[in-house]
Amino acid sequence: MARPARPHPRDLTQSWPDTPSTSAVGEVARLFSLNLRAAIGERSLRAAATACELSHVTLASILDGRAWPDLETIAKLEHGLQTRLWPTA
Amino acid sequence: MARPARPHPRDLTQSWPDTPSTSAVGEVARLFSLNLRAAIGERSLRAAATACELSHVTLASILDGRAWPDLETIAKLEHGLQTRLWPTA
């Protein structure tokens, strides 16, 4: 049975990832993706994904606001990129 | 098609939630659950879950290490309990 649809992070702002979300949860997702983008820096998506033991498809979907990463994925990203990504606001 | 099984957070330590995990990701999950338990404090699971707009079943599964909460759930928990839960180690 299909799951009921839920909005993607990108659906919770008028312009992903530039415009702040009026949803508290959407704003956490947006700030997380910006932190992730900054942490990747000049690396390719593939190189960053490999460092995190994730697929580049997963990484791209998070950056694009098309997925809600779970705790395992978030922890892999912080561990692989050696930086805090969870928003502190 | 069924997804391949993956270990639950509780499977990544010898004694959940007391014994540190040798897995970096498992340790984040363990510390998160301890932070969550502390933030709930004397409240009932149901009262805490209501404050977070989550089900008490979801809350119990996270505390028991039987689920990987996603970013939406983590953000709802921090927002509802008005505290940081993501481990800072």
Image (cartoon, coloured by chain):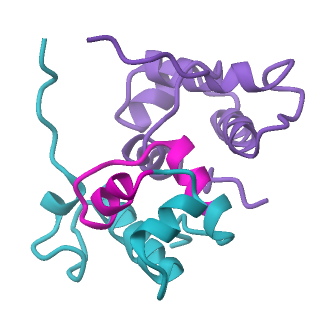
Chain colours: A purple, B cyan
A54, above or below A64, in the image: below
Residue B57: within the magenta?
A: yes
Which residue is nearer to you in this view: B17 or A50? Answer: B17
Q: Position of residue A70 (x, y in %)?
A: 43, 41
Q: Position of residue B70 (x, y in %)?
A: 46, 42
- Residue B79 visible within the image: yes
Q: Residue at x 58, y 20 (%)?
A: A44
Residue B77 falls left or right of residue B33: right
Residue A29, by quadrant, is top right
Which residue is nearer to you in this view: B66 or A40? Answer: B66
A74, above or below B64, in the image: above
Q: Residue at x 52, y 32 (%)?
A: A68
Q: Residue at x 12, y 26 (%)?
A: B4
Give the residues in magenta.
B55-78
Image quarter hosting the N terminus of chain B: top left
Residue A7, by quadrant, is top right
Q: Position of residue A71 (x, y in %)?
A: 42, 48
Q: Position of residue B10 (x, y in %)?
A: 18, 62
B68, above or below B80, in the image: above
Residue A86 falls left or right of residue B60: right
Furthest-right residue in view? A19
Residue B68: within the magenta?
A: yes
Furthest-bottom residue in view? B42
Which residue is nearer to you in this view: B61 or A89? Answer: B61
